[in-house]
Image: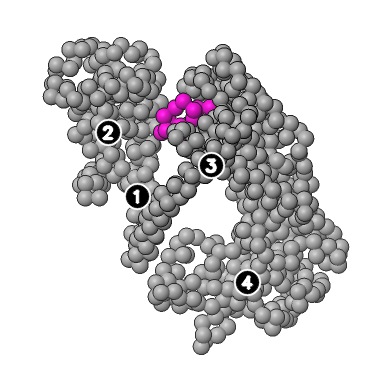
Amino acid sequence: MDQIQPYLDYFAQHPDWALIIIFLIAFGEALLVIGLFVPSTAVLVGAGTLVGAGKLHFWPVIIATILGCIIGDQVSYWAGRLFGERLKTFWPLSRYPHLVAKGEEFFKKNGGKSIALGRFVPGVKAVVPGIAGMFGMSQIFFLSVNVSSGILWGFAHVLPGVLLGQALSLAGELSGRLLFVLLILLVVLAVAGWLIRVLAASVTPYRLAIQGHLAHWANGRSSPIMHRFASAIAPENPKSMLVVMLIVGFVLAMIALIDIVSGLFLRHAVGNFDLTLNNLFSELRSPPGDELMERLTMFGDEIVLWATATAVVAWLAYQKAWRPTIAVVVTFIVARLIVLLASFSFSAPGTLAMPSAFRFPSEHALLAGVVFGVIAVLCSHTMARWTQALVAATAAIIVIAISYTRLYLGVNWFSDVGGGLLIALILTSIFGVALATMHHLKIKPFGMLVVSSIAFLFAGGLHINTNFAASELAYAPQDKMITYPLADWSNTNWSKLPARRIDIAGKTKELFIVQWIGSIDALKAAVEKQNYKSFGIWTLRDSLLYLDPHAPLDTLAPRPATHEGLKAKLTAVLPISDKVPARLTLRAFQSNVVAKDPGAQRVYLVSLTHETLHSQFNMFALPMGEQASVDEAKQFEAALKSDPSIEVLGEKQVGGSPVLIMKPKS
């Protein structure tokens, strides 16, 4: 931090010069040898910190960073093209012959990839562009790699600083007690990481022993396939760890899939968590977000994924890698058959669930997981470890992004998406283990990545350009409202709504004691007549007061609560004790039911909790709640019934507690 601070201070005092300095630092970092002595990481992280703190704008900083590193590498490349081998005799390269030799070795080993990889490798990043020029790399190829890797490099250096700046900005508003809590959290994470490493090291001998026994057993079989499996799983095989990971992934995915499927068929419906998450995303939708998610989800449509899969198969066939080709084709066919044959529809729990075309498993999640999982596994057999990790991470990001869009757009339950991903993991694991038994694979993964990426992007772009209007209509938000005549609702249908609040994890909580049919403003006016104090929408700032262990209960906002993923539309509190701080907290949650008589009025579900103050370690205080007692609920309901502006439509019993159905008088 001491290294960054001088630059932070200068940027803060001279914002007009900030972008120029950022550009020059990124430019200098990319120059031959000179870049070794330019503190680019410190300065750019510092610039990002000022962005996070609100002192600089994000996009100008990013653009200045990217342009600086791209132009700096381009100048170094031109120097190499212009002077060739003579460049080694010029200052400052002449002072560092060992660095030039190291850069040449790196370039010969990695070829065109060295331009992108070299940016992130200390010791060679400042000489690789010049060496690429000396070795005659074409300008078009260099420029394409330079621009693409420069964009990634710029974001990788600025974004961590943005997050740091936001954290420091937030921490500056809090007491030292929060900083102490954050410090404890960092210590806990560090200790946890150390324990994981120790555990992994202690387990390794047992893992190797199990692999040895398994390889010995497989070698004892008469099947050639088992012999190849023994060779793949043998501890001395450097690729054996990948096979072990695939087998473990297969077992865990099978267990999780059995759990999900058994739960779905036993309930004949998805769980509360599915409905909660669906409602939560429906509240988060916005036109800009919808447009982005609709475009992303179209990249997961079958036509795009099959185009990508076809490119993979065509590349393998071109390389005459017949056995991998057959394995890939079989895996894709099995995935498609699962989508066709094992497709079930499950509604949400309860009788008020909207009819749904949701299908288990999610076709998008399953096919995307299989296609990109197969690509990642194919690349893992001939690539270096870090390159494998980069490809696998990229594939995972694409699959997760496509799966996320299905949840955001409300076209799949979480169970659908989870089931699709688990089946994809199972099929990918089987394919990976089968591939490990094959020898002398002629895959050339970098070519396959280029071909499949072009197919994916081209097919996706063409599909979006051609069918976006129809897709936009299909993914438009659905009207989930259900209308009942008021008399029917108050007499019988009232019981179709949940009797208890369902939290974000899908667990049932306190009972609802009132069903309010009318506007939320009318309910707010009614409870304020009973001396309840209304709170606004809960924000993160409300949590800051929790860090004061001496804060009075009446100054603390009630903790946020949700029902089926939806926040409370009204929160109000009533102090009930002077000796021991306590209060009643009322929350009203909006349902998807409208009662009509003759005007349409939304039905709200009202809960009541008894809250007290809990202080821990003299560091923070939290209002903790439990369901209000029957007497407290009856007193509250009696107060509402005595209000002449309220009409009681019915009084029911649920779980030993009274439930009132009421509305404001016309």
The magenta region covers: 374-391
Residue at the bottom extreme, as displayed = 579
Vertical position of residue 149 compared to residue 135: above or below: below
Please rate how many residues cluster around mark 2, counting C-alpha atoms within 10 Å: few if below 14, some from 14 to 19, many from 20: few
Q: Which mark is residue 165?
A: 1
Task: State the SS at label 2.
Answer: loop
Quarter of the image that includes the C terminus: bottom right
Q: Could you tell me if the residues under marks 3 and 2 are in contact, i.e. CB atoms within 8 Å? A: no
Q: Nearer the viewer, residue 103 or 154?
A: 103
Which one is in front in this view, the residue at disc 1 or the one at disc 4? 1
User: How much space separates mark 1 and mark 2, taking CA atoms?
Assistant: 25 Å
Q: Which residue is mark 3?
A: 213
Q: Which mark is residue 586?
A: 4
User: How much space separates mark 4 and mark 3, taking CA atoms?
Assistant: 63 Å
Residue 377 covered by magenta stretch: yes
- Mark 1 vs mark 3: which is more N-terminal? 1
Q: Which amino acid type is marked by label 2? A: Pro
Residue pictured at 57% horizontal, 14% vertical: 320
**Magenta stretch, main secondary structure class:** helix
Q: Nearer the viewer, residue 205 or 44?
A: 205
Which one is in front in this view, the residue at disc 1 or the one at disc 2? 2
User: How much space separates mark 2 and mark 4, taking CA atoms?
Assistant: 59 Å
Residue pictured at 79% horizontal, 47% vertical: 355
Q: Which residue is mark 2?
A: 122
Q: Could you tell me if the residues under marks 1 and 2 are in contact, i.e. CB atoms within 8 Å? A: no
